[in-house]
Amino acid sequence: MAAPLSRPRCLHGLVSPSPFSVFLPSIAPISRASRSFATAINEPSATESLTHKPRVRPTKFVDKLNTGPSFSDFVGGNEPPLEPPEAYALKTAMVGPKGKQKEITRLPSWLKTPIPDSSNYKKIKNDLRGLNLHTVCEEARCPNISDCWGGSSKSQATATIMLMGDTCTRGCRFCSVKTSKAPPPLDPHEPEHTAEALSRWGLGYVVLTSVDRDDLADGGARHFAETVMKIKSKAPGMLVECLTGDYAGDLEMVSLVARSGLDVYAHNVETVEALTPQVRDRRAKFRQSLAVLEAAKAARPSLITKTSIMLGLGENEEQLWATLRELRRIDVDVVTFGQYMRPTKRHMPVHEYVTPEVFELWRQRALGMGFLYCASGPLVRSSYKAGEAFIENVLKKRKAGRHETAAAAMAEQSVSGMSI
């Protein structure tokens, strides 16, 4: 017996009387349960959609710039200038990573100087490198280098030549010059090279200084004196200032340098007597420095003697007054005051940034005590070209006065001879 034929079924599983009935519009599919996802997605309710906050666009630099001050805020307005206490108020800032931040004092505006980039600066630097010479301007990171080296001509520029190499045998806590117990030997050609460079520049006033060389028997005094004599032989009209060390208290070496032909003998006491052990090397003593200045004046009474004091190390007024009285007692002619500026983190920190008003006050006090000249200001250093210009004029007047006296004496002698 034949098997019964199965009735055709449509795509939706319904029995269709005819294979063509699936295409008839009267047949509707049976609704079945929709499939769900493995993870259900909860649609937000109407109340939730009302309280939901839209995503905020991250702030960009342009937004901050637009909300900041405009150009007119800087150039417009008729606001009165700040009072000195406000203008000199120090600003602080937090530096360092999160959790390890510390507060630092920002450098005051009156201590900021331009970056040196003038053509004259580059010329002087090339001359120094070509002759293998060093300057204290570079080694001590002087902030005035752009001002002193950047004159309109070399004759108006000032560079302090550092003799006997760039490595010192002492380690003062304020100085950034390299130190070593055994620095390289002296260059025997240095006096000649120095004289050649200075005669090339045609300067009217030059400053020579040196590192301390306690490894040498004479502390380098003969090398210093030879350099001065070479300069005077090549340029007799050039005025020479020598900023020397203390030669370990050997006053004979001080006298040797003082009689070498220089015009100004400078030696820095650096700070007040009470702070000397903390600021200077243990071999540098306040009383020893006073003895050096006194011996230089004794060797040549007509010699101008000069010293420099740093402020901002923690000194007080009474200590400064006492220091000035000691300097006047030994007849020091010139004193300068400048702000101590920390060269690196390895050096002693700045105790105080002294305002320009206080520097001006000490300048007036020093002149009132009888000093021939006083340069005082935050950026003033021991070889400061404004001070050099003044001392140069004083020396020229003295020389002119001596010439006039000599001419008058000769005229008087000739008149007396004729009368006889």
Image (tube, helix red, strand yellow):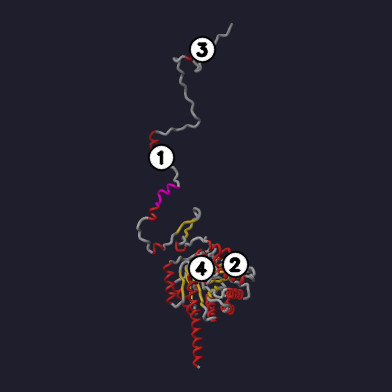
Q: Which residue is mark 2?
A: 133
Q: Amino acid at mark 1?
A: Lys
The Cα–Cα distance between marks 4 and 1, rounded to whole angstroms, is 69 Å
Dot 3: element: loop
Q: Position of residue 375 (x, y in %)?
A: 46, 71
**Circle 4: is it few (<14), some (14-19), or many (20+) Cα within 10 Å?**
some
The Cα–Cα distance between marks 2 and 1, rounded to whole angstroms, is 71 Å
Looking at the image, tell me whether mark 1 or mark 3 is earlier in sequence order: 3
Q: Position of residue 354 (x, y in %)?
A: 45, 67
Q: Per the image, is 301 magenta?
A: no
The circle on residue 19 is 3
Q: Which residue is mark 1?
A: 53
Q: Magenta stretch: dominant SS?
A: helix
The Cα–Cα distance between marks 3 and 4, rounded to whole angstroms, is 115 Å
Q: Which residues are magenta?
A: 61-70
Compared with 37, 98 (above or below) is below
Q: Amino acid at mark 2?
A: Leu
- Which residue is found at the position 50% from the left and 17% from the top? 13
Q: Which residue is mark 4?
A: 156
